[in-house]
Image: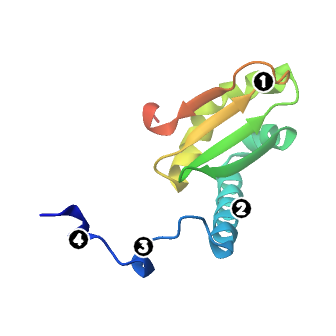
Amino acid sequence: MNQHQFSLPNDDLPPTLPTEEDVILRLELARSTSQRFYEACDRITQAFLYRCDWQIAVQANIPVLVISCPDVNTYWQIISLIDEIGKNLNKLVNNAKIRIYAPNGKNMPLEIELDERLL
């Protein structure tokens, strides 16, 4: 059998480029997930996140918590809280990544996939 016999008509195929509505929904999902994540964190974690520039972005349909630390002390504090951060993120999504940037921005970020961690 020819594989083209089972293909869908063009009207039934997903769009090749995201629509404006897709972009808006993705941004709203990231905003809502960020808010719920922050609220799930304890006060100590919230205090250290507040010092950082952080966001939850969706890349290739995988949520990524991106944290940019302003100084070395905050970077190491965030690293020490990584299990707690991972647990809180895992409450919201099953498959996600955490990417932490050191303050100088010259090194490769530390990247952790939640499914790799024993949370």
Query: Label 1 belongs to which residue?
Result: 102
Check the image and report above or below for 35 versus 66.
below
Residue drawn at (62%, 31%) of the image: 82
> Considering the numbered disc 4 on the image, is that residue within a helix, a strand or a loop?
helix
Q: CA distance from mark 1 to mark 2?
A: 24 Å
Q: Amino acid at mark 4?
A: Phe
Check the image and report above or below for 99 versus 11.
above
Query: Label 3 belongs to which residue?
Result: 13
Q: How is the image coloured?
A: rainbow
Disc nearest the viewer among 4 and 1: 4
Check the image and report above or below for 45 versus 28.
above
Disc nearest the viewer among 1 and 3: 3
Residue drawn at (68%, 50%) of the image: 56
Q: Amino acid at mark 2?
A: Arg
> Considering the numbered disc 2 on the image, is that residue within a helix, a strand or a loop?
helix
> Considering the numbered disc 3 on the image, is that residue within a helix, a strand or a loop?
loop
Query: Label 4 belongs to which residue?
Result: 6
Mark 4 touches mark 3? (CB < 8 Å): no
> Considering the numbered disc 1 on the image, is that residue within a helix, a strand or a loop?
loop
Looking at marks 2 and 3 on the same chain, the residue that comes earlier in the sequence is marked by: 3
Q: Nearer the viewer, residue 63 or 70?
A: 63
Judge left or right: residue 1 versus residue 28.
Answer: left
Looking at marks 4 and 3 on the same chain, the residue that comes earlier in the sequence is marked by: 4
Measured as percent of width and height from the top left, residue 15 is found at: 52, 70
Mark 1 Cα-neighbour bin, 10 Å: few <14, some 14–19, many ≥20 = some
Query: Label 2 belongs to which residue?
Result: 31
Q: CA distance from mark 4 to mark 3?
A: 12 Å
